[in-house]
Amino acid sequence: MNLLGGLLLALASLATIFLLVSSAPRKSLTTRQIARYGVYTALAIALGIVESFLPDFLLPGMKIGFANLAILVVLYAEGFLPACVISLVRVALIGMLRGNLLSMGGWMSFGGAFAAILAMLAIKALLKKASPISVSLAGAVAHVTAQMGICLIYIRSIELLLYLPLLLVSATVSGLFIGFIALRIIKILGAKPKPSL
């Protein structure tokens, strides 16, 4: 890892600590919470790395989104801010490991992850009893839409939009699949949903 990568890793670590500590302003994080966040982060990173070696799902460039499974469970079990921080740290660390953090692929990953977590928060906040399946579906659709937008900025070819309906169908299938698995995991864990923020 070069100097820039090391600095980015250090900044990501500091940002993670700051954001997670500030999410609980009246009390400091307990050792148990820090351990849980570490496990969720490691799981999201591991799932993301494993998925990068799997073949594309239905369409070229399309992945099922196994890493989002961990993020969805965190959103329901821990709340929005931990889910957002863990999602962005996951993207940053995988980008550094793969060497494409500041490339088009890296920005597409950041944009997709950020759009997905915001869409999941919006659905969860607007529909108080929204199931993980509908929240996952919203996240998957937002993810591919944001990635397509970033791709259009880089490539500047309107013909790319012809690919969007196919991506949306694929995202719908993967979003439903991941949401169903997340629902089962949340029930097994007995996680009580946290407030949206």
Image (cartoon, helix red, strand yellow):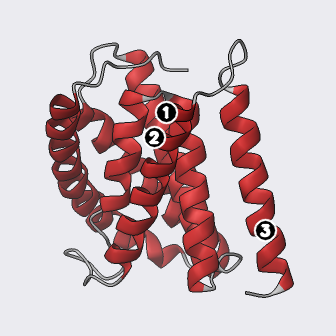
Q: Please, what secondary structure does the residue beneath circle 2 have? A: helix
Q: Secondary structure at mark 1?
A: helix
Q: Quadrant of the C terminus?
A: top right
Say which residue label 2 marks: 36
Instruction: Report the residue marked by disc 1.
Output: 32
Q: Quadrant of residue 57?
A: bottom left
Picture quarter containing residue 31?
A: top right
Name which of mark 3 and mark 1 comes first in the sequence: 3
Label whose residue precedes the other's in the sequence (3 or 2): 3
User: Which residue shows up at 69% across the image and 47% down it?
Assistant: 16
Image quadrant in which the N terminus is located? bottom right
Q: Is residue 150 in view?
A: no
- Structural crowding at the residue carrying mark 2, measured as other residues with C-alpha within 10 Å and reported as few (<14), some (14–19) or many (≥20): some
Q: Disc 2 vs disc 1: Cβ atoms closer than 8 Å?
A: yes
Residue 186 x/y as whole percent: 23, 33
Q: Residue at x 37, y 72 (%)?
A: 162
- Report the amino acid beneath label 3: Leu
Q: Secondary structure at mark 3?
A: helix
Q: Quadrant of residue 149?
A: bottom right
- The residue labelled by disc 3 is 8
Q: Is residue 152 above or below residue 3?
A: above
Relative depth, front residue between 33 and 94: 33
Of circles 3 and 1, which is in front?
1
Q: Where residue 192 sits: x, y (%)?
A: 31, 18
Q: Are marks 3 and 1 in contact (CB under 8 Å)?
A: no
Task: Measure the alpha-carbon separation of dots 3 and 1.
Answer: 27 Å
Q: Nearer the viewer, mark 3 or mark 2?
A: 2
The reply to whether residue 126 is in sight is yes
